[in-house]
Image: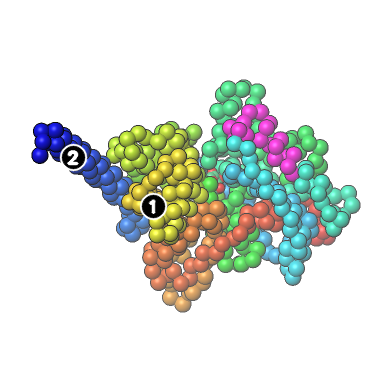
Amino acid sequence: MGKVAVGAAVVVAAAVCAAAALVVRHRMRSSGQSAKALAILRELEEKCGAPVGRLRQVADAMTVEMHAGLASEGGSKLKMLISYVDNLPTGNERGWFYALDLGGTNFRVLRVQLGGKDKRVVKQEFDEVSIPPHLMVATSHELFDFVAEALAKFVSSEGEDFHLPPGRQRELGFTFSFPVRQLSIASGTLIKWTKGFSIEDAVKLNPFAVSPQVGEDVVGELTKALERVGLDMRVSALVNDTIGTLAGGRYYNPDVIAAVILGTGTNAAYVERAHAIPKWHGLLPKSGEMVINTEWGNFRASHLPLTEYDQALDVESLNPGEQIFEKIISGMYLGEIVRRVLCRMAEEAAFFGDTVPPKLKIPFVLRTPHMSAMHHDTSSDLKVVGTKLKDILEISNTSLKTRKVVVEVCDIVATRGARLSAAGILGILKKLGRDTVKEGDNQRSVIALDGGLFEHYTKFRECMESTLKELLGDASDCIVIEHSNDGSGIGAALLAASHSQYLEVEES
Ligand code: GLC
């Protein structure tokens, strides 16, 4: 071999060694990184753990807080709001009514014809409008004006068959899915905004902003907005979505005793015995029932499995320190928790390569429907996960291993939320004494469930239902979860009917 050839061989060998060293170093680094990512994953799993024992503690704490909230005003994080609904629909409701369902990212307007016991809902028509994001932090009258205009447009599409007796005003059941201190069935003041609505912030910027501010009469503000668009309509019932869902559920099934919303936010309402409401002693008949809006989204207890991600999300939210149960369960937040976990993996374990993908740093960019789509991906190469990561977070060329970790993060976060919501339901059943089997009593208790999370996130729903079974044991045979599809709108219309200004005229 000539000198040149030897030299070349040496150079090539050296280059090969250097390349091999680089590969080894890269492998070592990347195996160190993936070990770090896995450590973050295992830590998440541990912190989100919700074994049965812990869920029972959560349920017990929920029951205790329910008692405290009923005992005195401000006695608990659970507001336990009186709804003024003391007679739920019977089926006898008749006539044409409107409903407006406002409280998430969309609102719905509907009109129904109620035909009494035999005919029930003869006809219903609805329209769904999404709320432009800027109106969720709007100034002035914008939000309610937008809603009133949509309602006026919907009213103008009434067909020939809409027969209000001459001279009668149209009546509306208004589902307003925020905490409201009711003053009667058709009036109440806003306690606070939740779920990313923040009109108070706008108010700080613009002192002339109204509609409705905390402490203001919600129906009064809507009525003014209806007047501004020239719509003659009376608000005959103001209800929370949980109350509407309970009313809608009861209309079809007399065994419905509670309603739970698992959607953008989460909350529960149930039928309480009037004598069990100390803060209302003297004001309510001792016999009879009253529907209570628990506002369980604001529940918190030391037993809740909280993580650093939840703490950071809470601190940076529009309502820090509030709605903690909601922030670990509901659709508004689940995707955001997943994003925060992935972001930490990217920062500390170079999980998506040497740099942190810029999109991953944007709060709320990963929404719960995206998370759900990734979680339900059954393809062998997790194609949907790959596509979502690329389309939403602009992360391309992810390995199967990476995708699997992403699915695991979704699973941990969704499982915690689903199991905790089952614990919340157990808390309500305990309060009603319906969590155990009683000798000779096989009374069924039906819980009406609604909300996008429940309806569309199958794994969440299945986990919630199986956890409830696990918690209830033998008693689970008597407890039924029933999907009350958009029951809250119909429920509000039914309550408008049972509180119609023309009721006495009709009855006489
Ligand atoms: C939020 C609201 C509550 C509502 C729930 C579900 O928790 O505060 O009133 O029922 O979301 O929409």
In the foreground, 395 or 92: 395
Q: Nearer the viewer, mark 1 or mark 2?
A: 2
Q: What is the C-alpha distance between the residues marked 1 and 2?
A: 38 Å
Q: Which mark is residue 407?
A: 1
Q: Is residue 215 above or below residue 86?
A: above
Crowding at mark 1 (Cα within 10 Å: few <14, some 14-19, many 20+): many
**Cβ atoms at labels 1 and 2 below 8 Å apart:** no
Q: Is residue 86 visible?
A: no
What amino acid is labelled 2 in the image? Val
Q: Which mark is residue 16?
A: 2
Residue extending farthest to the bottom is 440
In the foreground, 237 or 374: 374
Q: What residue is shown at x 32% (from left), y 57% (from top)?
A: 51
Measuring from the top left, give residue 360's x and y in whole percent. 42, 37
Residue extending farthest to the right is 166
Is disc 2 placed on a helix, strand or loop? helix
* Position of residue 1 in the picture relative to residue 46 (left or right): left
Q: What residue is shown at x 56% (from left), y 33% (from top)?
A: 198
- Number of numbered discs: 2
Q: Quadrant of the N terminus?
A: top left
Question: Magenta residues?
Answer: 134-151
Q: What residue is shown at x 46% (from left), y 65% (from top)?
A: 434
Q: What residue is shown at x 67% (from left), y 48% (from top)?
A: 128
Q: Is the shortest distance between ligand 1 and the CB of mark 2 under 8 Å? A: no
What amino acid is labelled 1 in the image? Val
Crowding at mark 2 (Cα within 10 Å: few <14, some 14-19, many 20+): few
Q: Is residue 254 magenta?
A: no
User: Sequence order check: which comes first, mark 1 or mark 2?
Assistant: 2
Q: Is residue 219 visible?
A: yes
Q: Quadrant of the C terminus?
A: bottom right
